[in-house]
Amino acid sequence: MAKKEIICAGFGGQGVLTAGMLLINAGMEQDKNVLFYPSYGSEMRGGTAKCTVKISDGLIASPISKQPDILFTMNTPAIDKFEERLKPGGLLLVNSSIVPEDRTYREDIKVVKVPATDIAAEVANPKGANLVMLGALAAHSDLFSVEYMETAIVSFFEKKGKGKFNEKNVACYRRGVEGK
Amino acid sequence: MRLVAPETVTFTQSGFCPGCGHGLAVRLIAEVMEEMELSEKLLAIVDVACGSLNIDSWRFDTIMAAHGRPIATAVGVKKVRPENPVMAYIGDGAAYSIGMAETMHTAIRNDNVVAIVINNSLYGMTGGQCAPTSLPGQITTSTPKGKDPKKAGMPFRVDQAFTGLDIAYLARGSMADAKGMMQSKKYIKKAFEKHMRGEGFCLVELLSPCPTNLNMTPVKSVERIKNEMIPFFPLGEFKDKKEEE
Amino acid sequence: MAKVLLKGNEALAEAALAAGCRFYSGYPITPQTEILEYLSWRMEEVGGEFIQAESELAGINMVLGAAAAGARALTTSSGPGFSLKQEGISYLVAADLPAVIVDVMRIGTGLGDIAQGQGDYWQLTRGGGHGDYHTLVLAPASVQENADMMAEAFDLAEKYRHPVLIASDAAIGQMIEAVEIPEFKEHDINKFDWTIKGCKKGTEQRKIQNVYYTHPDYEGYLTEKYRQMEQEQRYETVQVEDAELVLVAYGISSRVCRETVEIAREEGLKLGLIRPITLWPFPVKAFEEAKAARAFLTVEMNILGQMMDDVKLAVGSGYPVDHYGSIFEIPESDGIIAKAKEMLKKEGK
């Protein structure tokens, strides 16, 4: 991995921004250059959450991603808005719990569907849907190894003083790796 | 009254007009500082108008701030040097017109600074224009036919506007005669006492003569204070928040 | 110190504290508000004073008071709010007072828009307020530089007894990167004799006022002061020596241009980059390196290409100078390269 650009988007409250922070934290701990760019001001009003994440061995130029390598989406509007921008051959992560099954996608991209909201509910960790998606991201991309991403998630929450939730968080993450 | 001016009053380069009230106010403040042993501690902030000449009239460490902003500047000074007495010395135009927001919000926050407001009912430095404190019918260079309250409003009374705010002290004195001056000095002293106890915002307004811009003799201009200004601007203490309140 | 993840605005705020700043007064305006919010809780933790002022006017004049009293004082704003501070900046300059004022730039005139922009080059570098003056202006291009430039800004402000401006922008303010906050330094408010502290009997009274009133040779003093400040040129160059066309960009745009140079050279197009770090003084020295240049192109997030004036002064009349502007959006390399090719083609004729 020399350089990866990821757009994370979904409803506010789905943990989209936390997912972005988990990704750049994982990158920083591997001494990579990282950048996280949120929406701000009036752009962030209205219930949608979005951030751009860049992780690179080299210098990072713009905070904007015109053509992301990975789309981490948590709802339908996010796919509507960003699918077109995805790099040919790029990875689109879909939360199949709330995105209609009959939706069609671009032919030249890889689509991975994970019932993230359902899995999080099953694990009794409703706020962990983003971690399910991160599991899928780790399993289907060469961004970080599955094991490293898990360690990075655990240490992130420990640093925040939220280590007691890590058991359930890891459970969500691992279900995401399995994809079901 | 003593005949010797406090050591801190220098007047070496003072440029006040004959009969001006600023010199009187300077003397009162300097006497209070001497009596309270604060002469070596007072930090003063003056406006750019006539009051700015005080920077050369007294020997206190002094900032000459932007027009209307001395109270805000004083707040900045006090936060950095909380042990020192900090005073903004400004005119009515600065306090109640261009700097009204600063005066009002310092009062709302009850910041611990003293404001001495010299009310001469006009803009002095710029040659006698209408101020928020100008009286109805007052001829000024910007109301040549007399101030029309229908257009410019009635004289602004700080005692009516600020008493509802949670401030430490609000008083108005006159510098028209010896009695008024003794009373004014008491108000100034009380304001600094409260200030040194950390009680909050203290504003003392002083009715002051401006013979030059009123086209009057010094004597006539102090008579005007007694006969025309005091009916609009009553003297006294309007807010005196007790320490424990 | 280990790296942490911080927003540009937060890193700047924390670094100000590290640099010994213990007085802040500001007013909310996007996209700088995080600085105000951060310091609203953090300033107290380090024993400093935070005031949310009633306006930018009050804010800058509180800073003037704090600076005169000896504190390292900071205020921050963005475009429209920064305009309101200009009066106070002019007074700070006149009174020889050090302070740091940050403009997290946005786009446009009047209200403009909160979108990414570099709309304030003129207002930051031309003086901005009334009278004869310039201020040193530092332009960071990353979250780390946002942090590193705070101590430098305060040091320069004290060295010259002059306000120093930081020209940050919305993108740098809002983005999160890994950053190392510089070590905390203590600042002594009695470090300088000129700060007001109370006048002891028999000593000289301290007067903080327009130096014009007190200086025996005001004109000579100011001329010399600005001559010295003009030596503080800071810049970076990227492959300028053999570049046919030199890009000139600062802040977030300069980061894009660094990548643009790389991409262009892969295609065989010899571009270079001059990145002013001080916007005033403008780094004219950097242009001496541009020996092969046939044209210069500024890349700025505004419409009129505000920096072109300074580039034209630096290179003289013999070279075409143009502007690649991108408003609301951060510029992109393909657009810049297309514009550069177009300019060189015209020159080839």
Image (cartoon, coloured by chain):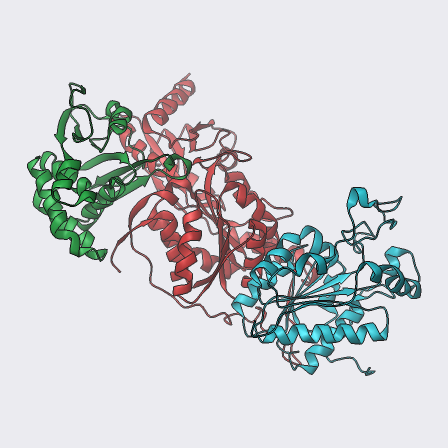
Chain colours: A green, B cyan, C red
Residue at the extreme left of the image, as rendered: A178
Task: Answer yes or no: is residue C109 visible.
Answer: yes
Give the side of residue C142 with respect to residue B28, left or right: left
**Front residue of A83 and C325:** A83
Dividing the image into 4 quarters, which one contains the C terminus of chain C?
top left
Outermost residue, top direction? C349
Residue C165, placed above or below residue B174: above
User: In the shown orientation, is residue B135 left or right of residue B94?
Assistant: right
Q: Is residue A143 visible?
A: no
Residue C331 placement (x, y as % from top left)? 37, 31
Q: Which quarter of the figure is the N terminus of chain C placed in?
A: bottom left
Q: Position of residue C323 (x, y in %)?
A: 45, 28
Question: At 79% from the left edge and 55% from the top edge, which residue is drawn?
Answer: B125
Q: At x 43% / y 42%, what residue is drawn?
A: C31
Question: Where residue C344 sits in the image (x, y, percent)?
Answer: 39, 22
How many tags in the picture? 0
Question: Looking at the rendering, which quadrant does residue C205 occupy?
Answer: bottom right
The one nearer the camera, B158 or B204, is B158
